[in-house]
Image (spheres, rainbow, N blue to C red):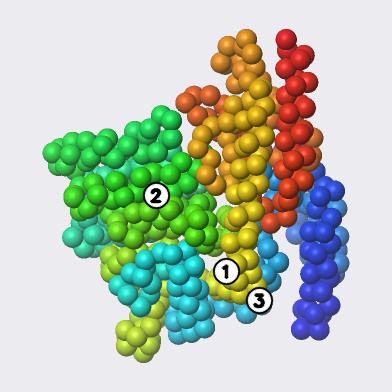
C-alpha cells in the first residue's frame, strides 16, 4: 500500500468509524450471533491474491458487525464500559502509524520520554505521592492491563522478599500472597505464573456488609504463616473491587504490611482514576504512606481505549532487579550510561507499543477539567439511578455505591432464594436480549445481584433513565406472571 493509497483508505476508515459511532444507538448493544456463526461466514482459506481494501471494509460491516458487542453503546452497563474517546482512538492511530518499538530508550527516545512525562502527569492529576514520580526513587510505567501490573508487582515483591536472590535462584514453595475473596482473579493467575501456585495464596476475610478486607484477619494469617516458616511476599489491597467497588482499608492493611515488611500492592484498576476529582481523592487514603506499588486503568474510566494501565512503584529497584536482563544484542551507550530509562525492564515482554501517545492525546484534548467532568457525570448518573432503585418497593440496592457502579436485586416476594436467583438471571437475560441495554451480574453473600456500571463515553441521563424504566417494567411483568 503506497502512502497515497493509504491516504485514500485511511480516510474511508476514519469516516467509517465516525459513522459507526454516530449511529451506534440504532444497533443492539449485545451481539446476537450463535457460536461459530462468524467463523462460518469467513472463508476457510486465506486469499491467494490480494483484495481491494474496500472488500475488507465491506466485510467488517456485513460479516463482523453482527458479531460485535457494542462496548461504546450508551446502553452498555455491563462489566465496566470501555472508554474509547475520539482523541484516544486518534492517538492510537498515530502510534500505529509510527510503528515504533519502544523497548529501549535508544529504539525511540520520544516513546520513552513521553511515557515518563504522561505517567508523571497522571500521578499529579490523581494526587498520588511525589515518590511515585520518576524523578524520585519510584516511577510509573504503562502496562497493557491491570493483570500484567499485578504480575509485575508480585515479581518485584518476591525479589524484595527473597533478599534479591529470586531472580537468580528462583522461588520456592515458602512464598505466600494475600488477597481477599473480592480480589480480582488476575492475582491468583499471577501467583500461578510466578510459581507460587494456588497453594501459596491466602484468602483474607472480608466484612460481610462492605465486602472490604479485614486487616485483623490479615494479621492473623501473616502470623500463622510466618510461624510455620512461610515468607509472605505481597498483600494486594483493592480500591474499588470488580464485583461491587468495595474499598479495602489501605491504611490499616498498610500498617500490618509495614510491621512485617511485606510488599503492599494497591489494585485500583477501575476506581483509581476517580481521584482526578478532589471530592473523590479519599480513595487514595493510605496509598502515599503505605503502597509499594499502585495501578489504575485509564482504559476503564478515563476516556482511553484499551489497552492502558499505569503502574507506579515507590521504589523501582526491586522491579528492575526482578526483570532486568541485558543480552549483548541490546547493549548500547545510552543504556550503559545509566542516564536513560529502558521500560523493557519494567514489564514482562521485551517489545512495547507507543501507548503514551493516546494517553497524552486524551489528557491534552480534555484537560484536567474535562477528565473531572467525565468522572463526575458517571458518578452523578449512578447515584441518581441508585436513588430511583431505592425508592422502588420491588428492589433492593447494595450499599455502599460510592462511584459509578450500582449493584441491586429485584425482589420476588414469596420465592425461596434459589428460585429468586433464577428469576433474577432470567430477568437479566430478557433485558439483555432486548437490545437497548446490557448489564451483568455478580454474587453478594451467595445471592445473584445485577450490576449496572455507568461511565461510557456516550452515556447520558436519558439512557440511564430509559434503561431503568425497562428494568422496572420487565420486572413488574415477570413478577405478575409468576404470582
Ligand atoms: C478490571 C479489573 C482488573 C483487570 O483488568 P485488566 O486490565 O483487564 O487486566 C484487575 N483488578 C480490578 C480491581 C479490576 O476491576
Kindly identify which numbered label has been placed on residue 190. 2
SS label for mark 3: helix
Q: Is 95 located above or below residue 189 in the figure?
A: below
SS label for mark 1: helix
Crowding at mark 3 (Cα within 10 Å: few <14, some 14-19, many 20+): some
Kindly identify which numbered label has been placed on residue 368. 1
Q: Position of residue 262 (x, y in %)?
A: 24, 52
Q: Which quadrant would the C terminus be assigned to in this image? A: top right
Identify the mark nearer the N-term, 3 or 2.
3
Kindly identify which numbered label has been placed on residue 94. 3
Q: Which residue is drawn at the image coordinates 79% and 74% (left, top)?
A: 10
Q: Position of residue 325 (x, y in %)?
A: 33, 71
Please identify, in this view, whether the residue under mark 2 or under mark 1 is nearer the observer: 1
Q: Which residue is drawn at the image coordinates 30% and 72% (left, top)?
A: 137
Can you see residue 396? Answer: yes
SS label for mark 2: helix
Cβ of disc 1 within 8 Å of ligand 1? no
Q: Is 222 located above or below residue 275 in the figure?
A: above
Q: Which residue is drawn at the image coordinates 31% and 53% (left, top)?
A: 264
C-alpha separation, residue under disc 3 versus residue under disc 1: 22 Å
Q: Position of residue 77 (x, y in %)?
A: 66, 43
Amino acid at each position: 500500500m503506497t502512502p497515497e493509497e493509504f491516504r485514500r483508505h485511511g480516510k474511508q476508515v476514519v469516516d467509517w468509524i465516525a459513522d459507526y459511532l454516530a449511529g451506534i444507538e440504532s444497533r443492539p448493544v449485545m451481539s446476537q450471533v450463535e457460536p461459530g456463526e462468524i467463523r462460518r461466514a469467513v472463508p476457510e482459506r486465506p486469499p491467494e491474491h490480494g483484495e481491494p481494501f474496500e472488500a475488507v471494509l465491506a466485510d467488517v460491516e456485513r460479516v463482523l458487525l453482527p458479531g460485535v458487542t457494542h462496548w461504546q453503546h450508551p446502553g452498555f452497563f455491563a462489566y465496566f464500559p470501555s472508554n474509547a474517546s475520539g482523541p484516544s482512538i486518534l492517538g492510537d492511530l498515530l502510534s500505529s502509524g509510527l510503528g515504533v518499538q519502544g523497548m529501549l530508550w535508544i529504539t525511540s527516545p520520544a516513546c520513552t520520554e513521553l511515557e515518563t512525562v504522561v505517567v508523571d502527569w497522571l500521578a499529579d492529576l490523581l494526587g498520588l505521592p511525589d515518590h511515585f514520580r520518576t524523578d524520585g526513587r519510584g516511577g510509573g510505567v504503562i502496562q497493557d492491563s491491570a493483570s500484567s501490573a499485578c504480575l509485575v508487582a508480585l515479581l518485584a515483591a518476591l525479589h524484595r522478599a527473597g533478599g534479591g536472590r529470586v531472580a537468580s535462584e528462583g522461588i520456592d514453595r515458602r512464598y505466600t500472597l494475600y488477597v481477599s475473596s473480592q480480589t480480582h482473579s488476575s492475582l491468583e493467575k499471577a501467583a500461578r505464573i510466578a510459581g507460587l501456585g494456588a497453594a501459596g495464596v491466602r484468602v483474607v476475610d472480608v466484612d460481610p456488609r462492605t465486602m472490604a478486607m479485614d486487616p485483623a484477619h490479615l494479621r492473623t494469617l501473616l502470623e500463622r504463616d510466618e510461624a510455620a516458616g512461610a515468607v509472605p511476599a505481597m498483600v494486594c489491597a483493592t480500591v474499588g473491587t470488580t464485583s461491587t467497588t468495595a474499598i479495602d482499608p489501605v491504611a490499616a492493611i498498610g500498617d500490618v504490611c509495614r510491621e512485617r515488611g511485606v510488599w503492599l500492592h494497591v489494585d485500583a484498576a477501575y476506581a483509581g482514576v476517580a481521584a482526578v476529582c478532589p471530592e473523590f481523592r479519599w480513595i487514595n487514603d493510605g496509598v502515599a504512606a503505605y503502597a509499594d506499588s499502585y495501578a489504575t486503568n485509564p482504559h476503564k474510566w478515563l476516556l482511553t481505549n484499551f489497552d492502558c494501565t499505569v503502574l507506579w512503584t515507590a521504589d523501582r529497584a526491586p522491579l528492575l532487579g526482578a526483570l532486568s536482563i541485558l543480552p549483548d544484542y541490546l547493549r548500547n551507550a545510552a543504556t550503559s550510561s545509566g542516564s536513560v530509562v529502558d521500560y523493557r525492564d519494567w514489564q514482562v515482554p521485551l517489545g512495547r507499543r507507543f501507548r503514551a501517545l493516546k494517553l497524552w492525546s486524551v489528557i491534552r484534548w480534555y484537560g484536567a477539567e474535562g477528565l473531572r467532568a467525565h468522572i463526575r457525570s458517571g458518578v452523578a448518573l449512578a447515584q441518581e439511578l441508585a436513588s430511583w432503585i431505592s425508592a422502588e418497593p420491588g428492589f433492593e440496592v447494595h450499599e455502599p455505591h460510592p462511584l459509578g457502579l450500582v449493584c441491586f436485586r429485584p425482589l420476588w416476594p414469596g420465592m425461596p432464594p434459589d428460585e429468586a436467583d433464577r428469576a433474577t438471571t432470567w430477568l437479566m437475560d430478557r433485558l439483555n436480549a432486548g437490545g437497548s441495554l446490557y448489564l451483568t451480574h455478580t454474587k453478594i453473600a451467595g445471592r445473584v445481584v445485577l450490576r449496572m456500571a455507568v461511565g461510557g463515553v456516550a452515556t447520558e441521563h436519558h439512557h440511564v433513565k430509559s434503561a431503568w424504566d425497562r428494568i422496572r417494567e420487565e420486572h413488574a411483568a415477570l413478577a405478575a406472571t409468576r404470582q
